[in-house]
Structure formats: structure tokens, C-alpha cells
Amino acid sequence: MKLFTDFIYAMFGGILSLDALSAAKMVVMWAVGGVLIYLAIKKDMEPSLLLPMGFGAILVNLPLSGAIDQMREMGIEAGALSELFRAGIANELFPLLLFIGIGAMIDFGPLLSNPKLLLFGAAAQFGIFMTLLLACVANLIFPGMFSLQDAASVAVIGAADGPTSIFVGNYYGTKYLGAIIVAAYSYMALVPIIQPPVIRLVTTRRERLIRMPYEAKEISKTVRILFPIVVTVIAGLVAPRSVSLVGFLMFGNLLRECGVLNSLSETAQNALANLITIVLGITVATQMQAEQFLSAGTLMILLLGLVAFIFDTIGGVMFAKFLNLFTKNKINPMIGACGISAFPMSSRVIHKMGLKEDPQNFLLMHAAGVNVGGQIASVIAGGLILNLIAR
């Protein structure tokens, strides 16, 4: 009889270890993983990240899953994904390596042709600090829901910058890291759905019809090489904690622009970025275990993340409208929305919106300049938060 019992437990021990509530939570997380996989495959929304995250969510929510750490009779048995988390996310390594690949992909030419576009990137970070305030207010209404460090981690979602969100959230050790990562990448994938109605809400058709002729300027190789170096130095002086974020991003761009490391640049853009994206996506799922993920705090984070995203968009648009009060050559305020860090998706969305209003209005290069400016501004904003709020 004991032999039979042992056999049954060996075969079905995982299922038998669950109570009704745990089983229900497990199924819910399977559904969450399924939705992420659906969005990745069917809707083509950031598939390189959402698909690994979705599959990982299922993987870590299997009963007694060997993919994550489990308490056994002989002590803690390490899981593969938990080990990857400790090796690459707990020490911020994976997000930083991903920044090298992102930096190698970025052409700062449009921004260098019109440096004032960097101001739109800065203005579009308004949502980060607004959401930080709102998260603190939410904590007053629901005492104990968020610490100040949790609020700071949530606020960075508004930049639509996944690696920075991971870096800041992990730095503060927030228990909501999984929800923050899901929100950051999900909203980044939803840029084509979220931004257009928000932009139309705060602009008139006349403003959306403003044409901005693009005058291509030749940017010397010396300027292109000096730019990432100078940005790193300035960022380090303004927000020292942003040095690793900005530095790895700019190092990737230096590989691209130096002209003597083309093979390394291509490796960073393709092999390195793809490999880290796959590993990062499935590893962050360790923070999507049902006990941590299914909570009122997670729902609040998803809501605050949406608010942050919307206010970032509005901040950039309103800044452009403000400048139009004083400038002779009017700016199409839609390009201000590209100040978020969702590169190059946001600039493509704005370009398509411009063409829809006027088939002869080509905003892509201006939008791309603002978009890469937003990439820089978002990591500096993340560094400023790290400076302002103690761990």
C-alpha cells in the first residue's frame, strides 16, 4: 500500500500539493501567460519579449515547478530560471547588456541635425514624476500598498523603457517587479493603440496638419563619435547613478559610429540583443508567480503604468504647443509624443498619423529625432530617481 501511495505521490505530487485557491491562481496565471503569447503571435506586439514572458509565466506556475527554486527535504533545490535571475537581473546585468545592443541600433543623426529635439524627450518624462506623485497618493488612500521605493519603480513605466524599468525596480528590490515589467513591455507594445487617441484628444486638426520640411544636414564622423562620449560625461555629472544605464547605451552607439568595429556593432545589434532579449524575457517570469503577481497592488500598477504612459505622451505634445507660442516656424505637436522611449515604434506611429491627416506631410525624421532623444532622457530620468530616493 505504501509503495502504491509513494507511486501516486511521485506521479501527481505537484497537483496533490495544491489547495483550491492555489489551483485557481495557477490557472489564472496560465491564462495571463496565454494572453501574452496570443498578443505576441496573433497581434505581433513585441513578440520577442511577450512570447518568452508568456511561456515563462506558465513555466513558473506549474505545481512544484523545477524551473524555480523549491524547498525539498535536503534543502533548497535551485531552479534554472531562478539561477538566471540571480545571474542576470538581480545584478542588473541583462538590462545593461541589452542597452549595448539598443545603442548600436540607434542613429542619432536626426537628433544631431536638430539638437533642440532633445528637449521634447525631456518634456515627455513628465509622466514619470506625475505617476510618482500619484503612487504616493494611492499609498495614502490604501496604506501599506506602496513604499516610496515601490512608487519610484512604478513611475518609470511611463518612459516605455523596459530595461530602465527593470534596472530601477530591481535596484529598489520592489516586490512588484513582475507586474512592472509586464506593464512596461505591454504598454510599449500598445503604443499604436494608446498614443493616437491621446494625441487627438489634446490637439486640433489644424495643429496635426502643420508641415515640417526636413533639411538633412551632414553630420561629421567626429561629431558622431564625440556625441556618445559627451552625453555619458554630462549624464554622469547630472545624475551619477545613471552612468551605467547611459554609459552602456552610448557604448553601443560608439561601436556603431567609430567605423572600425563593424563586426562588433553588428553582433551587438543582432546576436547579443536577440540572445539577451530571449533570456531576459523568460527570466523575468520568475517574478510572475501567482502568489506575488495576483494582488490588488498589481492591478494598481497596471493602472498607474497606463496613467504614466498617457501623461508622458501629453507632456511631450503640450511642450510642443507651448513652443509654438514663441516660434515662427511652427512645430507639429504630434512629434512631442515621441519623447517616450519606445524606439522606433512611436516615431512610426506619429509618421503614419501625419500621413493620414495629410499624405504629403512627412514627419518621420523629426519624430525619430525626438524618439532617440527620449531614449536618452528616459535613462537619465531613471538615474535622477535613483539619486532622489534612497534605497
Image: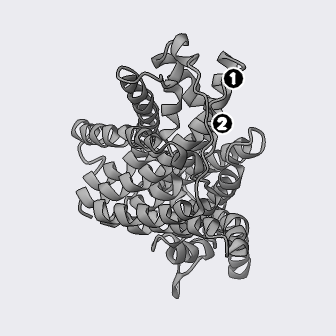
- Relative height, residue 121 to residue 288 (above, below): above
Q: Secondary structure at mark 1?
A: helix
* Residue under the point 58% across and 75% down: 84
Residue 129 x %, y %: 31, 42
Q: Is residue 51 left or right of residue 24?
A: right
* Residue under the point 36% across and 20% down: 325
- Relative height, residue 256 to residue 55 (above, below): below
Q: Amino acid at mark 1?
A: Leu
Q: Is residue 52 left or right of residue 296?
A: right
Q: Which mark is residue 218?
A: none
Mark 1 or 2, nearer chain start: 2
Front-most of residues 315 and 181 = 315
Front-most of residues 136 and 249 = 249
Q: Quadrant of residue 56?
A: bottom right
Q: Is residue 118 left or right of residue 56?
A: left
Residue 356 x %, y %: 69, 19
- Bin the neighbour count of mark 1 within 10 Å (Cα to Cα): few under 14, some 14-19, many 20 and up: some
Q: Amino acid at mark 2?
A: Arg
How many numbered tags mark residues here? 2
Residue tagged 2: 348
Residue 243 x %, y %: 39, 67
Say if residue 262 shows up in the picture: yes
Q: Which mark is residue 355?
A: 1
Q: Secondary structure at mark 2?
A: helix
Q: Quadrant of residue 189?
A: top right
* Residue under the point 57% across and 48% down: 185
